[in-house]
Image: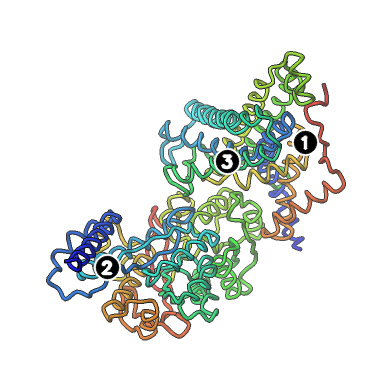
Amino acid sequence: MDWTNFVNTFGDNTRDGLALGSIYALIALGYTLVYGVLRLINFANSEVFMLGTFGSFVGLWVLDVPQIGQEKTGMALLLTLAFCILLSMAFSGGSAVVVELVAYRPLRRRNAPRLVFLISAIGASFALSEAVGAFGAKKRDTYALPEILNTNKRLFSIGGTNILLRHFVVVTAALILMVGLNTFVNRTRLGRGMRAVAQDAETARIMGVNVDQVISLTFLIGGLMAGGAAFLYILYLPTTRYNVGFLLGIKSFTAAVLGGIGNIRGALLGGLVLGLVEKYGAGLFGGKWLDVIAFIVLVAVLMFRPTGLLGESLGRTRV
Amino acid sequence: MRKMMRVGMAMLAVALAATACGSSKSTSASSTTAAGSAAAGTGVKCSGIKIGYLGALSGENGQLGQNMVDGANIAIDEWNAANKDCQITLVKSDSQGDPKQATPLADTIVQDKSIVALLGPGFSGETKATMPKFEEAGLPIISPSATNAQLQNNGWKSFHRILANDDKQAPAVSALIKSKGAKKVGVVDDASEYGKGLADGVRKDLGALKVADDQIDPKASDYSAAVNKMKAAGVDYVFYGGYYAEAAKLVKQLRGAGVTATFVSGDGALDQKFVDNAGKDGEGALLTATGAPPNVNPEFQKKFNDRYKKDPTLYAPESYDIVKIYSDALSAGKQDRKSILEFLGTYDKPGVTKQIKFDSKGEVAGDSVYSYVVQGGKIGGQGIIK
């Protein structure tokens, strides 16, 4: 154990853990929302995220972003960013809805057993990722993105730890999206519909809720959150590739379970805890132990709290 | 009459096979044009002989494999032009550099008896995974790029490689770093057969100069834990053992966190895509390779340039040499796996990269390691590391 390094890197690792954790949390929402409503693990969510990163990439390509060293500023920069986040969200949200229509709805109509949904989810995930790998412009290679803004600019410093623009943007934007979503689910009519379907789909249907519409909406919102995460990820680490979602997806799913699957606040907590544990673990034991530490913590938490840190509250709490 | 028909059918079949070969390799357009000029030559006679290629052609580090195929295709076409009655083809298998994907491909190669020799496997991990199958089949193997320093110690009779291994590269990396006057060095690897092997060698040779080390997961993209460790240790040089895709991400993240240490890496990162992906953060990076630089042989450089409109890429000269060795075997009348393998043991001829002679473990003689530097978005050769 390397305590010296743990102490020396504590500040930096906290900052990076929170930033990465915010991205985990946003992707985790896609898993948690769908689970809450359908009791289904939507494994294709990681590919929905991957398509979102390509959304930003396409946005930059369409706008013909200039070479490195001639970054845009002011209004032009804001418009570029807005265009990219919209495209990312459109790619992710759109693909999430399509996945639901193609891979899940026909099965639901036929009252297929749960296991079939799981296989369908895994199939959709592989199909999307391999399609991008096989037919993308650069095949399975890494797509490196031009830097649209200097995200390494130092904003301020807390106790010797420099907070750079990218850390600040990622954490703030993730928090705004999460708070927005929480409000939407708890305060609006559509959110009430989602919670109703989560509690009891049959009764909700009798009470006049359009269940199919609510399910589509759930996938759409999960996809939009993944799209937001994808855009932030591109700002944070400006590269992507066909399988970028695989490991991130597994980690985010872990974060969702850690916080309590089906629980929106749990996804946030789970994401942040997982991000921090990974970075601290790597700092203390070395990078090769990163995943080992993270999953030991997961198992330990589930042993004492089988429903996750905040419990499997689903959509049914806080009505 | 019936006998004549049978002969006619056989000839027709050969002709069909020949056209099939020609059309399946649309990239080698020169083979058809050059074939006519050599018609009068004293060609070797054979039929249906193939040379296999196993390595990455797509995927994260696919460019390295493409370089090998580019180099090999020149030698294949030269042979086909000079030997009209013995047309050979290169059968490419794309492993994506992944040992798991390489293993079933190795089965296919072994079962195709018309494949008499192999160019590859490309990377060390897939070499380790597939060699037992090739060894069992007695298929002659010459790798243009697998440099892990343990591969030769498995007692494989069919294994050869045409460049010095990482045991030679690691001391050269340390010598290079020391010669630049480094005070504190950080070492990071990607846990791969190649990356960890090379980095461990460097760790050993650096001794007390190494003040920090860490490992990253190449499947992940965020390496901030390793970056923070380097930053906290205040290193002035960082050595990374791994391939170019991750090397580019790592150097970007190091610079992003304000670490200005000189970035050093081995032949796995020696690719233009490292420079392209790393952008301005890659400037000044030092790279090493046991593979020869583009200008190692002016004649080959010209051939490569004429055909691909660029300078020879990493491992292209080595791959050219390998196909030349197999060509020499065919010329000597060795046309099956067993006799080609025996032929390799006695081989001693100059290639474009070096004098080629294999020892009993399949290692090539000599131990030249070259250094390179990234400048102005290009990789420039700096000669042999002393």
Q: CA distance from mark 2 to mark 1?
A: 62 Å
Subunit bearing disc 3: A
Q: Does residue B234 sit above or below A263 in this rendering?
A: below
Expressed as whole percent of the image width and height from the top left, the position of residue A158 reads 71, 43
Amino acid carrying mark 1 in the image? Gly
**Badge count:** 3
Q: Does residue A314 sit above or below B269 in this rendering?
A: above
Asked which quadrant contains residue A93, the reply is top right
Residue at point 62%, 54% (across, down)? B227
Q: Taking B91 as reference, is A268 left or right?
A: right
Specify few, some or many for label 3: CA neighbours under 10 Å numbering under 14, 14-19, or 20 or more.
Answer: some
Amino acid carrying mark 3 in the image? Lys
Q: Which residue is mark 3?
A: A153
Image quarter hosting the C terminus of chain B: bottom left
Of residues A83 and B236, the one drawn nearer to the viewer in this rendering: A83
Image quarter hosting the N terminus of chain B: bottom left
Q: Secondary structure at mark 1?
A: helix
Which mark is nearer the camera, 1 or 3?
1
Asked which quadrant contains residue B327, the reply is bottom left
Of residues B18 and A125, the one drawn nearer to the viewer in this rendering: B18
Subunit bearing disc 1: A
Expressed as whole percent of the image width and height from the top left, the position of residue B56 reads 45, 59
Q: Taking B267 as reference, is A6 left or right?
A: right
Tell me, yes or no, whether dots 1 and 3 are on the same chain: yes
Residue at point 54%, 42% (across, down)? A127
Q: Taking B92 as reference, is A102 left or right?
A: right
Amino acid carrying mark 2 in the image? Phe
